[in-house]
Amino acid sequence: MRQPEPEPQSFDRVLSSMCTEPHPDARAAAERFLATNPGDPATYEAVADLEARAVERLATLADHPDPERAAGYVTSGGTEANVQAVRSARNRHGGSDDGRAGSGVRHGGSAVNVVAPASAHFSFTKAAELLGVELRTVPLDDDYRADADAVAAAVDDATALVVGVAGSTEYGRVDPIPELAAIADEVEAQFHVDAAWGGFILPFTDRDWSFADAPVDTLTIDPHKFGQAPVPAGGLLAREDAALDALAVDTPYLESRSQATLTGTRSGAGVAGAVAAMDALWPDGYREAAERAADNADWLAAELADRGYDAVDPELPLVAADVPESEFAALRDAGWKVSRTGSGELRVVCMPHVTRSTLRAFLDDLDGIRR
C-alpha cells in the first residue's frame, strides 16, 4: 500500500534556525540545475559559469577589492567553508616544498595551531580533528565578542590561522575584525572571517567585517541562510587565488584536471539557486529584510525585558534571554522550535520568515505559560 507523501517542515513556528524559506526564483533555478555537477566544470560548463557569477555576487556583498576576479566557490555550507579555510591556512603555513603541510606539523616540530574565540562555530572543532591542527579557543569579553588581548596572547610562530566571527551563532555578535587581522599579521598567519550567517545582514550596518575593513584572507558567507537560497548553498571567498591553489588536488579522470573543493560531485542546484536569489534580492530586497529583522529583534528583546526576563541587547537580529527551563520546555511542547545558547538562554533568530505576527503569537503563548 502506497504511503502518503510526507510534507516538509513548516517554518510557521521555527525560531531557532538560521535557514529560511528560499526565494521563489531560487527554488525554480535549483530545480533546473539539479543534475548538473559544478565539481567537473569542464564538462558542466553552464553551471560553472553560474558558479563564477555566484562568487562575483558574494564578493560584491563582502566588499572584495576586485569582485570579478575573486577566488571562491559555492560550498555545502559554512562548515565546509570553515574547514577549507583551516586547511588552506595549514597548507600555506609550511611543511613540504609545495606549501602543503599535510601532517599539520611545521618547522621545529611544533603543531600548527588555529586561534579562534570561544564563540567560533563548532565546525572549527571538526576542522582541527580532521586536519591534525591544534585549536586554541580564547575567552570572550563582557559583550560576547573575541577578547583581542586574549587572542594576542594565544598566537605564536606556529599559528597558521586567526579566526574572527561576524555574526556569532549564539548572540549575533561581531568580533573586532580589524584588531584580530592586525594580530594575525604580526605572526604572519592567515586571517579568516566566519560571516556564514551575518554576511547578508552586515552590508547594511556600520560594522567592520569585510575585505574592505581589514586584510581578510578568507571569508565564509552562506546564501542558504539570510541569503534565501535553497539548501545547500554555502560560500567560501578568498582575497587571492593562492588560498584556493593551496587546496587543489589532481583529478586525472575528469575533464577538469584539478579540484580545490572539499566535496567532489556537487549539485548545481545550490549554485543556481544562490545566483537566482542574489539576482532577485540584492541589494534592496536584502536591505529591507535586514531592517525588518533588526526591528523585530529589538521589539522582541524589549518585550521580553518588559516581562522581567534578562535579554541580551541585539547587535544583529538574534535575541537571547534568560527563560526558565520549565517555560522553555512548555514552549517546545506548544510547537515552538526554539533552542538554547551554551549558557542556557532562550535563543530566537529573526530570519526573513519570522514576522511580527509570529512573534506576537509566541509571546501570547509565553504569557499563557507564565499564568
Image: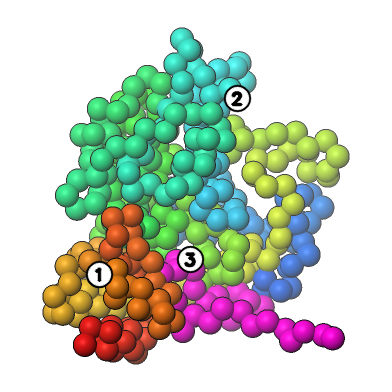
**Would residue 339 be visible to someone looking at this image?**
yes
Q: Which residue is mark 3?
A: 225
Given the image, on which type of amino acid does mark 2 rest? Gly
**Foreground residue, 103 or 308?**
308
- Of the two numbered discs 3 and 2 on the same chain, state the one appearing first in sequence: 2
Discs 3, 1 touching: Cβ within 8 Å: no
Mark 1 and mark 2: span between their CA atoms?
A: 47 Å
Q: Is residue 353 magenta?
A: no
**Helix, strand or loop at disc 3?**
loop
User: Residue 36, how many percent across, how many down?
Assistant: 77, 61
SS at mark 2 in the image: loop
Tell me where residue 315 appears, x and y as whole percent. Answer: 25, 63
Quick check: 91 left or right of 119? right
Q: Say which residue label 2 marks.
A: 102
Identified at 37% across, 19% down, the residue is 157
Q: CA distance from mark 3 to mark 1?
A: 29 Å
- The residue under label 1 is 324
Tell me the kind of residue under disc 1: Pro
Circle 2 crowding by C-alpha within 10 Å: few under 14, some 14–19, many from 20: some
Badge 1 marks a residue whose secondary structure is: loop
Q: Nearer the viewer, mark 1 or mark 2?
A: 1
Q: Is 274 on the left-hand or right-hand side of 349?
A: right
* Earlier sequence position, callout 3 versus callout 1: 3
Does the magenta portion include 21? yes
Q: Residues within 10 Å of mark 1 (few under 14, many from 20)?
A: few
